[in-house]
Amino acid sequence: MIILGIDTSCDDTCAAVVEDGRTVLSNIVSSQAPIHHRHGGVVPELASREHIRNIVPVTDQALKSAGVEGRELDAIAVTAGPGLVGALLVGIYFAKAFSVALDVPLVGVNHLEGHILSIFLEKHAPSFPFIALTVSGGHTNIYHVQDFGDYTVLGRTLDDAAGEAFDKIAKLLGLGYPGGAVIEQLASQGREDAIDFPRAYLSRDSLNFSFSGLKTAVVLYVRKWMEEKQLNREVTMADIAASFQAAVVDVLTDKMSAAAGQAQAPTAVLAGGVARNARLRSIMQQRMAQDKVDLFISSPEFCTDNGAMIAVAGYHRFMSGHRDGLSLDARSRFPIDQV
Ligand code: KG4
Ligand code: ZN
């Protein structure tokens, strides 16, 4: 079963070809980062315009490097939401046209389901049930995953997503967009214990997240630090990045540990763009090992947005009989329990 997966939910134009929901034949991502970099964040109109420019060549490249002709596809899976509506529409309308032209079924996919199921692109994949933390620029959620298509939300962010916090702090420090990778690199030269930034745990037993207090604390610290920089040479920008990253990693690992305990889950999955962070990967590994929970982490290329994860989710929806018609529409909000 050969599925083309397309994602244009944010600022990457993605297309991939995946066989049987497991084997990646190609995975092409055209990043718009240089375009949004100077604005310190994604500009929705620019993202849509770039998707329009890129969607045809990116899909063409995905088919060519997979060695697959359009008419050999069994289905076309496309992200229907959540995401930026103007950006989503480019992928959706392209997928509709392609599906009609090739006479191949169309399947709309929830982007968050794609992040969760990205783990099935790995050689060693988990068995159900498991808990999953998807941590990206738009979302920070913990799910209890019982089966393909069966997801219960255990916790979510009440304000900023973790990746959004990385991006905002990077902007504040004048490091451009996207911020995660730059902050991580800077943090590797800093001291994690230089500044004790707040960790928000909310109520006891809560599996929800809040990163806005941390963000405000860093903003206030940086303002003061800039004013005093001439006098205070003790704290470097790398120290700020490392201390901020440590606060995010602490909360994510503590909540994941609590979720595994509450759900009595023997298995956990870590996915989404922020899961590329090496510090998060290693601390999460240590903690899950202590908790005797088997942890599976997506490969870096499948953590950030990609078409392969959409093809996996599309494959399982297609196998369960799901089909979409030309009425498929973009959904800026798309709760996962509505898939
Ligand atoms: O999953 P993704 O590509 O898009 C969304 O669905 O949001 O995630 C992008 C996010 C950005 O906020 C980016 O700063 C963050 O993932 N990110 C990282 C790292 N690489 C990407 N955050 C921390 N450390 C990284 N190495
Ligand atoms: Zn994403």
Image (cartoon, helix red, strand yellow):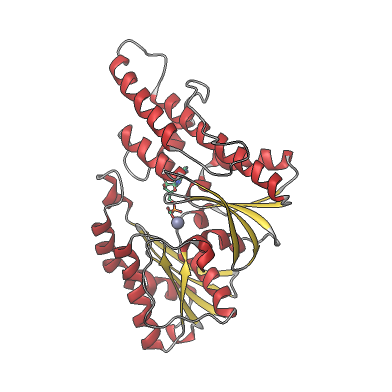
Q: Nearer the viewer, residue 65 or 189?
A: 189
Q: Is residue 124 left or right of residue 315?
A: right
Location of residue 166 in the rendering, given as x and y in whole percent from the top left corner: 41, 40
Who is closer to the viewer here, 181 or 257? 257
Q: Is residue 282 visible?
A: no
Q: Is residue 133 above or below residue 279?
A: below
> Which percent across, then down, holds residue 241?
43, 30
Image point (41%, 37%), residue name: 212
**Where does residue 84 sit, x and y in percent of width and height?**
34, 60
**Tally of marks:** 0
Judge whether 177 appears above or below 4 on screen.
Answer: above
Indicate the position of residue 157 as horizontal and vertical percent values: 48, 46
Q: Quadrant of residue 290?
A: top right
Q: Residue at x 51, y 33 (%)?
A: 200
Residue 324, compared with residue 167, is above or below; it is: below
Residue sitting at x 37%, y 64%: 8
Q: Is residue 265 left or right of residue 316?
A: right
Residue 5 visible from this viewpoint: yes
Say above or below: 318 vs 143: below
Q: Residue 261 lies in what quarter of the image?
A: top right
Q: Residue at x 45, y 38 (%)?
A: 211
Query: Which quarter of the rendered picture does the N terminus lie within?
Result: bottom right
Q: Furthest residue to the bottom?
A: 103
On the rendered structure, is 249 left or right of 289?
left
